[in-house]
Image (cartoon, rainbow, N blue to C red):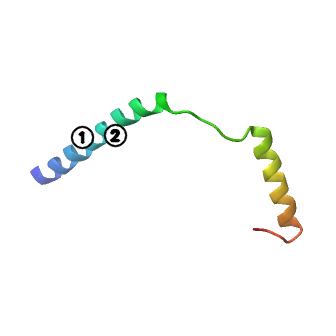
Amino acid sequence: MDEILRKIGRNVLLLQQLEQILKWTVPRLTVSGNTSVDIKRNFEKREIQCLSGHCG
C-alpha cells in the first residue's frame, strides 16, 4: 500500500510541476499561421482532389 501511495504522490507532483510550466509558458506564446479562410480554402481544395481521385 505504501508503494502505491508513493507512486501516486510522485505522479501528482509531476502533474503539478507540468501545470506550473504550462501556466508560465502559455501566456508567453505567440500564435501565427493561416486564417480560418485559408484553412477552409485548403480543406475544400483537398476535398475536390480526393473526389477526383488524386488524394495525397
Question: Among all residues in the image, which is located at the extreme bottom?
Answer: 53
Give residue 20's position: percent from left, percent from top.
34, 33
Give residue 24's position: percent from left, percent from top.
39, 30
Q: Earlier in the sequence, mark 1 or mark 2?
A: 1
The amino acid marked with disc number 1 is Leu
User: Residue visible at 36% across and 36% down?
Assistant: 21
Comparing marks 1 and 2, which lies closer to the viewer?
2
The amino acid marked with disc number 2 is Leu
Give residue 19's position: percent from left, percent from top.
36, 36
User: Residue visible at 10% across and 50% down?
Assistant: 2
Q: Residues within 10 Å of mark 2 (few under 14, many from 20)?
A: few
1 horizontally vs 28: left or right: left
Question: Among all residues in the image, which is located at the extreme right?
Answer: 52
Read off the residue under disc 2.
18
Q: Is residue 1 visible?
A: no
Q: Residues within 10 Å of mark 1 (few under 14, many from 20)?
A: few
User: Residue visible at 84% across and 52% down?
Assistant: 44
30 horizontally vs 5: left or right: right
Label 1 element class = helix
Q: Nearer the viewer, residue 13 or 23?
A: 23
User: Residue visible at 15% across and 48% down?
Assistant: 6
Which mark is drawn over residue 13?
A: 1
Q: Is residue 13 visible?
A: yes
